[in-house]
Every structure is written in structure tokens, then in C-alpha cells.
Amino acid sequence: MSKVFEDLAMEIAEKHAYEQKIEFAKKLIARGKQSLEEIAEDLELPLSTVRELAEKKSA
């Protein structure tokens, strides 16, 4: 049973880390000092995700 809890805790931690990356990417996009490619690479996010965030910001 503890394996289930360990897996759940890991899943929650990974989701939280991903959400933090998304929020940080939004801030970097708003600053406009880095290219979308650089943001994606630096934060280890898919470029398509960063582009989508940038499109939402400008909409």
C-alpha cells in the first residue's frame, strides 16, 4: 500500500513542478527578453507549450 502512496506523492510533486515551470515561463514571456526557444530549453518545456502560452498572453 505504501507504494501507492509513494507513487501518488511523486505524481503530485511532478505536477507541482510542472505548474511552477508554466508560471515561470509566463513571467519570462511577459518580460520579452528571451526567445520562446530559449525559454523552452531553459525550463525543459516543449516549445509548443511555450508558444501556446505566448499566444494566450497576446490574445
Image (cartoon, helix red, strand yellow):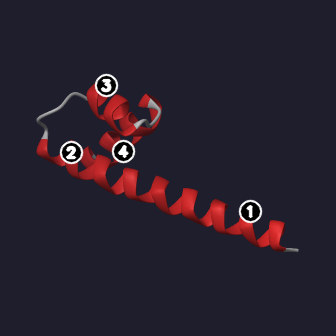
Q: Which residue is mark 2?
A: 28
Residue 40, position as x, y percentages in the image: 36, 33
Q: Residue furthest right?
A: 1
Q: CA distance from mark 4 to mark 3?
A: 13 Å
Q: Nearer the viewer, residue 34 or 4?
A: 4
Q: Nearer the viewer, residue 51 or 9?
A: 9
44 up-or-down from 24: above or below = above
Q: Which residue is mark 1?
A: 7
Residue 35, position as x, y percentages in the image: 22, 27
Q: Which residue is mark 4?
A: 53
Q: Which residue is mark 3?
A: 37
- Mark 1 or mark 2, which has the lower sequence index? 1
Contact (Cβ within 8 Å) of mark 2 with mark 4: no
**Residue drawn where x is 64% and y is 61% of the image:** 10
Instruction: Describe the element under mark 4 as helix, strand or loop.
Output: helix
Contact (Cβ within 8 Å) of mark 3 with mark 1: no
Contact (Cβ within 8 Å) of mark 1 with mark 2: no
